[in-house]
Image: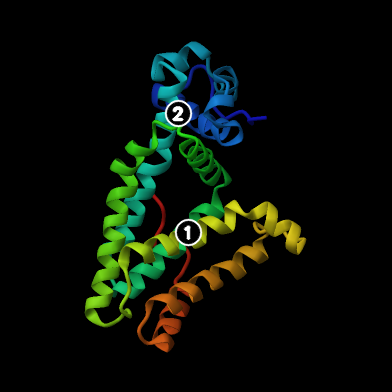
Amino acid sequence: MVEPVATSLSARPDDARGALLRAAIAEFAARGEAGARTDAIARAAGVNKALLHYYFGTKQALYAAALDAILAGLKEHYLGILEGPGTAGQRMLRYVLANFDRMAGSRDYARVLGHEMMRARAGESASVPRMVQAYFGPLNAVVCRTLDEGVRSGEFRALDPGQTALSLTGANVFYFLSAPVFTELTGRDPRDPEMLARRRVAILDLAASVLFADREAGQGTARAVLDEPAGTHPEP
C-alpha cells in the first residue's frame, strides 16, 4: 500500500503537483504502470482525484511525468560529476559510485526502471525511446567521452568506451536486480547497510581494476574517492 504523502487539499498548486508525483512514483514502483491506480495515487497525495486529472490528464501522462521527475535531476547530477573537476579517472569513479548510491538510496528508482525495462523487453514500452533520447543517450555520450579522454591521456588502459560503459553500469544494476537470488544464496539482504558499504568498496575496486593502466594508481584513486566527504557531490 502506498503511504499518504504529507499535504492537504488546500496545498499550493506546486505542492499538490509535487505530492502527486511523489505518490505516483511510489505507486508505479510497487505496481508498474499497468497495475497502478490513480485513485490510490490521489489518496496517497492527499488530493482530490480530479486534481490529478487536471494536472496530468491521463495515467499514461502521469507515468511519463514520473519518469521525467526521476531521470531529469539524475542526468544533471551525473553530468555535473563527469564534467566537473579532476582527472578522467577521478570523474569516472565518482560517477560509478554516484550511480550505485542512487540505486542503493531509492528502492522506487530501481523498481520503476526495472518495470520499464521488463515492459520494453515485452515490446510494450513507448517510453524507452524518449528516455534514451532525453536522458540515457546524452549521459552515455559523456561517459564514453570521459573514458576516451582517459585512454588518450594514458590514465586508462586501451579499452572500448562503449562496451566498458555498459559493463560498469551493468555491474551496479545487476546487484540490485538480483537481490532475491543474492538473499537466497547468502542469507543476507543486499540492502543491509553493512552489505551496501562492502559493495561500495567492491564496485570501485572493480572499476579501478578495469579502467586504469596503472592498477596501483587506480586503487589509490578509488580509495581517495571513497574517502571524499559525504555531500561532496550532492544530488539536486
**Residue 211 % position (x, y):** 38, 76
From the viewer's side, name the closer residue of 234 and 96. Answer: 96
Q: Say which residue appears at 67% left-offset and 66% top-offset.
A: 194
Residue type marked 2:
Tyr
Q: Estimate the spatial distance between the alpha carbons at disc 2 and disc 1, rounded to whole Å.
A: 25 Å
Image quadrant where residue 26 sits: top right
User: Residue 141: which numbered mark, if any?
Assistant: none
Q: Say which residue appears at 53% left-offset and 13% top-offset.
A: 48
**Residue named by callout 2:** 63
Residue type marked 1:
Gly
Q: Is residue 42 above or below residue 29?
A: above
Image quadrant where residue 234 sits: bottom left
Snapshot colouring: rainbow
Q: Is residue 102 visible?
A: yes
**Residue 19 % position (x, y):** 49, 29
**Residue 20 % position (x, y):** 49, 26
Q: Is residue 208 left or right of residue 144?
A: right
Q: How many marks?
A: 2
Q: Nearer the viewer, mark 2 or mark 1?
A: 1
Q: Is residue 208 above or below residue 17?
A: below
**Residue named by callout 1:** 170
Q: Say which residue appears at 40% left-offset and 21% top-offset.
A: 13
Binning the other alpha carbons within 10 Å of mark 2 as few (below 14), some (14 to 19) or many (20 upward) gives many
Q: Is residue 42 above or below residue 93?
A: above
Binning the other alpha carbons within 10 Å of mark 1 as few (below 14), some (14 to 19) or many (20 upward) gives few
